[in-house]
Image (spheres, rainbow, N blue to C red):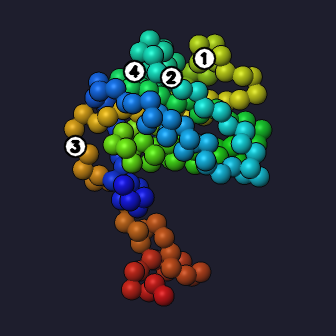
Amino acid sequence: MDAYKAILSKLDVRQFDSKKVPAEVKLRVLEAARASGTGNNKQEWRFLLVQEKEMLKRLAEDSTSGGWVAGANFAVIVLSDPTLGFHLIDAGRAVQNMELAGWDQGVISGIYTGVKDEKMRKDFTIPAGLKPVAVVGFGYPVKRILGKKNRMPLPELASIDKYGNKFDPKKLS
Ligand SMILES: Cc1cc2nc3c(=O)[nH]c(=O)nc-3n(C[C@H](O)[C@H](O)[C@H](O)COP(=O)(O)O)c2cc1C
């Protein structure tokens, strides 16, 4: 899939088909995480793959806002080092790359950030210096994804000059 099309059409979903995602797609997702750039190339993130039904259920129980992950085919817990000022940017870039790599193969995903830190640490043996900052659940979509995003218009989000004039495509040089 064209990268731009993938960005524009990818929605965050919370419902998945029961169809199995092949191992090679999971590998592409993890490789996409690994390929992400980090501040100073620190690479102080780690990725925990969760594939067993039982563990996906456990993951859901360890969450405050991602109970839906129980229905995912697999999930990736993103861990990062909270002492680094840019750790959330690093994690976010890896999340986005994983989601787009999956979507390129027809696998949709959703992210959540609400985790019960202590419980999750125990259940998934998370190293003390790392923090679970996001979880991404993946699977095939249950219905056709139309890619209609609820977003503010570009002129509300971007300015075209240093005076704060709203973005206007006619003023692009
Ligand atoms: C930083 C961040 C945190 C999020 N946390 C949650 C979450 O805890 N639970 C959840 O179900 N969705 C979560 N989302 C998903 C957002 O609700 C979703 O990206 C947004 O509604 C846009 O969805 P769309 O791309 O399908 O339009 C999070 C998204 C981001 C970027």
State yes or no: discs 1 and 2 in contact (Cβ < 8 Å).
yes
Amino acid carrying label 4: it is Ala
Pointer 3 residue = 144
- Of residues 161 and 140, the one nearer the viewer is 140
Local SS, label 4: helix
Q: Earlier in the sequence, mark 3 or mark 4?
A: 4
How crowded pointer 3 is (Cα within 10 Å; few <14, some 14-19, many 20+) is rated as few
Residue at 56% across, 29% down:
77
- Of residues 57 and 169, the one nearer the viewer is 57
Q: Earlier in the sequence, mark 3 or mark 1?
A: 1
Q: CA distance from mark 3 to mark 4?
A: 21 Å
Q: CA distance from mark 1 to mark 2?
A: 9 Å
Compared with 136, 2 (above or below) is below
How crowded pointer 2 is (Cα within 10 Å; few <14, some 14-19, many 20+) is rated as some
Local SS, label 3: loop
Label placed on residue 50: 2
Q: Earlier in the sequence, mark 1 or mark 2?
A: 2
Q: Quadrant of the N terminus?
A: bottom left
